[in-house]
Image: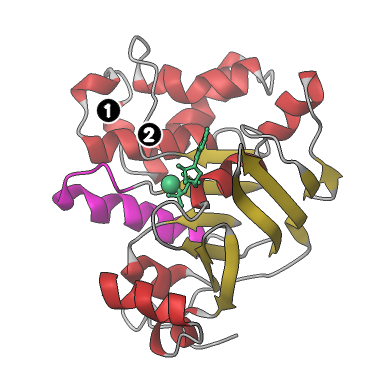
């Protein structure tokens, strides 16, 4: 594994294992737009993959296909070896294996923070209430908002709400967590607290696919960077190689604009 820039925190301990997410020859169109073109991507257990690319390159669509919020035209997607079912209860069960955190926090406004985190485990995982509550409080502690448990989402800052959204996903004990620009809607002073939670998840061995423009996070936490442009994966590299030595013109152009 390449040496990453993380002097401040010491080396990540990653156990890279079996494939958790596998996309093979995935194609998708929106009308005439070929939004995903022959996408091949395998993410192993414990791996952190950061997806970069210009706006409109298909990053969100890629994430949405992985938990079947979008259908695909051809190819296959498997989660922990199981092909994505198309509908019904098998789909709900498999979706529970794929946590997703979006730019908008999407918490239930009329439920408390604790209730937001307990809901999935109660309804989908059928956990007993006392167990779900204990687990929810533990996870809220981990993301640093345990003292907000009785409040409602609107009473929290954006950074706190996004940490609750992460907690809510974690409560389902997913096999993989997808993050689609989780800090893009936050005020600048709240970005770091959310990134810190994500780095700590990465260090804990969570399998993660992260779409972000936060290059510091990519350098610090990613095992691999995947660069997309116009619906294609153009480049896959370890972060140091990608940032210091991108091989494609499109990646160089992209980095020139954002760095
Ligand atoms: P990114 O996340 O990289 O910005 P997206 O995956 O959101 O890219 O979008 C890729 C392309 O697909 C864009 O051109 C976008 O306008 C288009 N697109 C996304 N969702 C839809 C949709 N539901 N219907 C039609 N076009 C869409
Ligand atoms: Mg997007």
Q: Quadrant of the C terminus?
A: bottom left
Q: Of 179 and 175, which appears nearest the observer?
A: 179
Q: Farthest front residue? A: 32
Of the 4 image quadrants, the one containing the N terminus is bottom right
The residue at 55%/34% (across/down) is 171
Mark 2: which secondary structure? helix
Q: Give whichever of 137, 77 is nearer the camera.
A: 77
Quarter of the view holding residue 126: top right
Please report the residue visible at 79 percent of the width from the left and 46 percent of the height from the top: 74
Mark 2 vs 1: CB contact within 8 A: yes
> Residue 223: image x %, image y %?
55, 73
Q: Find residue 143 and report its image quarter.
A: top left
Magenta segment's dominant SS is helix
As drawn, the residue found furthest toward the right would be: 82
| Residue 121 x %, y % | 60, 24
Whether residue 129 is situated above or below residue 169 in the rendered picture: above
Q: For this rendering, which residue is in front, 150 or 124?
A: 124
Residue occupied by mark 1: 148
Decide whether residue 11 is among the magenta residues: no
Name the side, left or right, on which 181 lies relative to 30: left
Residue behind mark 2 = 164
Q: Range of the magenta residues?
A: 183-203
* Figure check: 159 above or below 240: above
Tell me if I can see residue 174 in this picture. Answer: no
Residue 44 in the image, given as x and y percentages of width and height: 70, 63
Towards the viewer: 119 or 104: 104
Sooner in the amino-acid sequence: mark 2 or mark 1: 1
Q: Residues within 10 Å of mark 2 (few under 14, many from 20)?
A: many
């Amino acid at each position: 594994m390449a040496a990453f820039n993380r002097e401040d925190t010491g080396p990540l301990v990653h156990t890279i294992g079996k494939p958790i997410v596998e996309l093979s020859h995935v194609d998708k169109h929106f009308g005439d737009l070929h939004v995903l073109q022959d996408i091949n991507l395998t993410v192993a257990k414990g791996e952190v993959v950061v997806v970069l690319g210009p706006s409109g390159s298909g990053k969100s669509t890629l994430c949405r296909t992985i938990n079947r919020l979008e259908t695909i035209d051809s190819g296959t997607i498997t989660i922990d070896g199981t092909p994505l079912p198309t509908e019904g209860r098998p789909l709900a069960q498999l979706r529970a294996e794929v946590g997703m955190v979006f730019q908008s926090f999407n918490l239930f406004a009329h439920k408390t923070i604790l209730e937001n985190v307990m809901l999935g485990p109660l309804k989908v995982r059928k956990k007993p209430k006392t167990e779900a509550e204990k687990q929810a409080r533990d996870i809220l502690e981990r993301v640093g908002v345990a003292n907000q448990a009785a409040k409602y989402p609107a009473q929290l800052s954006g950074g706190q709400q996004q940490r609750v959204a992460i907690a809510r996903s974690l409560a389902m004990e997913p096999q993989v967590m997808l993050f689609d620009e989780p800090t893009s809607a936050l005020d600048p002073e709240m970005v770091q607290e959310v990134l810190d939670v994500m780095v700590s998840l990465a260090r804990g061995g969570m399998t993660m696919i992260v779409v972000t423009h936060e290059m510091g996070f990519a350098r610090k936490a990613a095992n691999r960077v995947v660069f997309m442009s116009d619906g294609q994966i153009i480049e896959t590299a370890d972060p140091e190689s990608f940032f210091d030595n991108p091989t494609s013109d499109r990646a160089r152009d992209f980095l020139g604009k954002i760095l």
